[in-house]
Amino acid sequence: MKTTTDELQTFIAIVDAGSITAAAERLGQTTSGGSRTLSRLEKKLDTTLLMRTTRKIQLTEDGKVFLEHSRSIVNAFDEAEEAVTSHSKTASGLLRVDSASPFILHSIVPYMDEFTKLYPGIKLELHSSERIVDLVEKRIDVAIRIGNLQDSTLHAKSLKPSTLRILASPKYLEKYGTPKTVEDLAKHKLIGFTDPKELNYWPLRTAKSDTYIANCHINASSGETIFQLVKRGVGIACLSDFMTMPDIEKGSLVQILKNHTVDSRQPIQAVYYRNTQLSSRITLFIEFLQKKLKA
């Protein structure tokens, strides 16, 4: 074997980060050290893996082939290490977690006292982002993504999927009445998302399809804002169980149009880039969430 795992990891990090400088920062190396490692790897293989310009890097055809095999090799090493070490050593160090604010507040914050007692050596940073962030650019170790994944380069572990329901508060229904049909929604105040617009496609059966495109009177960028507006009786919204179930059970939120609602469950996944130094912390955190959320 001509190459080393360190060289493979550096090559992968450069591709994922988009530059040698960003990869070096992520790996705790100097930029010159990362550049030398890449040059040494290319010399060993007697080929050019990356075309470098002042603005960007681009994989060559040989680079694309080598990247695919490199990921498989590094992942195999990581999985072997993880199987042996993740539960046999005390995990420690910083773990940065990113998610939309509703998931942070309703599905992570309630369990963090227990997590920090179980793993006192792990220091947590919780970041709230309403949009999908670049894990490398923002230096995020694990992110919670709701909905279908777009980035195939990420590793993913499934958490419990969450059902979507059409909800209103008793206060709103007492004042404006309860919609009996999907068509009745046109007479009511609807609350939706500014972006992406697909979040305003509600899982309701209509004469033409199983989707109702909500014409909203109020739009917000955060699901938490929408949640608070609905609780205060401002209008009707389509929200996910992970943030609303306690209020549904207490009766402070009411599901409406049950007979017209199509069963729709949002996939929820923890995503990350494989990194040997972080694998134990990531594994412990994700497994803890899976148990708490009963994935």
Image (cartoon, helix red, strand yellow):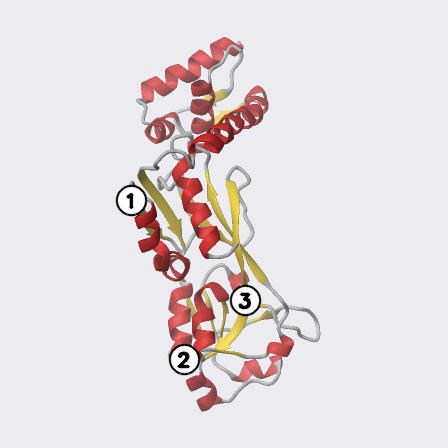
User: Circles 2 and 3: CB distance less than 8 Å?
Assistant: no
Residue ID for mark 2: 234
**Pointer 2 or 1: first along the chain:** 1
Q: Is residue 200 left or right of residue 211?
A: left
Instruction: Tell whether label 3 touches label 1 (CB within 8 Å).
Output: no
Which secondary structure, mark 1?
A: loop
Callout in the foreground (2, 3): 3
Tag 1 residue? 120
Q: Which callout, 2 or 3, points at the residue further toward the start of the chain? A: 3
Residue drawn where x is 59% and y is 23% of the image: 65
Q: Amino acid at mark 3?
A: Leu
Against 291, residue 214 (above or below) is: below
For the residues labelled 2 and 3, the Cα–Cα distance comes to: 19 Å
Give the tally of numbered discs: 3
Q: Is residue 213 left or right of residue 55?
A: right
- Find disc 3 in the rendering and name its residue: 164
* Contact flag, marks 2 and 1 (Cβ < 8 Å): no
| Residue 90 image offset from top left, x and y in percent | 34, 36
Give SS at disc 2.
loop
Farthest residue to the front: give it: 88
Three-letter amino acid code at disc 2?
A: Val
